[in-house]
Image (tube, helix red, strand yellow):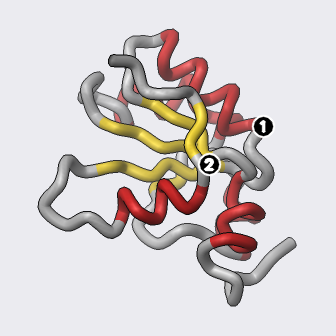
Amino acid sequence: MELPLEIGPTDVSYLLGRPGERPVRIIDCREQDEWHICRIPGAVLVPMSRIDELAPQCFTDQQEHLIVYCHHGMRSLRVAQWLRHNGFVNTQSMRGGIDAWADLVEPDMPRY
């Protein structure tokens, strides 16, 4: 069964908190300057502006569950669609981005 293209921040938090379950990899597709302000612990930075260049080295397991986020969810949606188009069928975009994460999961996180 295909995963929905988008997933909410509280669902992502739940998935990250399940030790021993199928791992989830969090991909931050924002730019380096945004990454330095705030990020989800354990996330890997793969900027959307460099996705074509970095994808071959960053994404090797097409069955891996990938969750992509950005600031508000628009860039991550595009990256998730691109990854799915390139065979990574278990890719999702975090709805609302890190801004929604800060609202719903980590209210003390720095914001911009």
User: Which residue is outermost to the left?
Assistant: 20
Q: Tell me the amino acid under the disc marked 1.
A: Met
Residue beneath disc 2: 69
Name the residue rendered at 36%, 49% in the picture: 25
Q: Residue at x 70, y 53 (%)?
A: 97
Under tag 1, what secondary structure? helix
Q: Pinpoint residue 40: horizontal percent, then vertical percent.
A: 54, 68
Q: Quadrant of residue 49?
A: top right
Pick whichever, 58 or 106, lies toward us: 106
Task: Report the number of discs.
Answer: 2
Q: Are marks 2 and 1 in contact (CB under 8 Å)?
A: no
Q: Kindly state the secondary structure of the residue where label 2 is placed.
A: strand
Between 63 and 21, the residue placed more toward the observer is 21
Q: Nearer the viewer, residue 14 or 94?
A: 14
Q: Nearer the viewer, residue 33 or 104?
A: 104
Residue 71: x and y, percent?
76, 54
Residue of label 1: 74
- Residue 95, horizontal then vertical, whole percent: 68, 45
Give the quadrant of the N terminus.
top left
Where residue 33 sits, quadrant-wise, is bottom right
Q: Position of residue 58 (x, y in %)?
A: 38, 38
Q: Residue furthest bottom?
A: 108
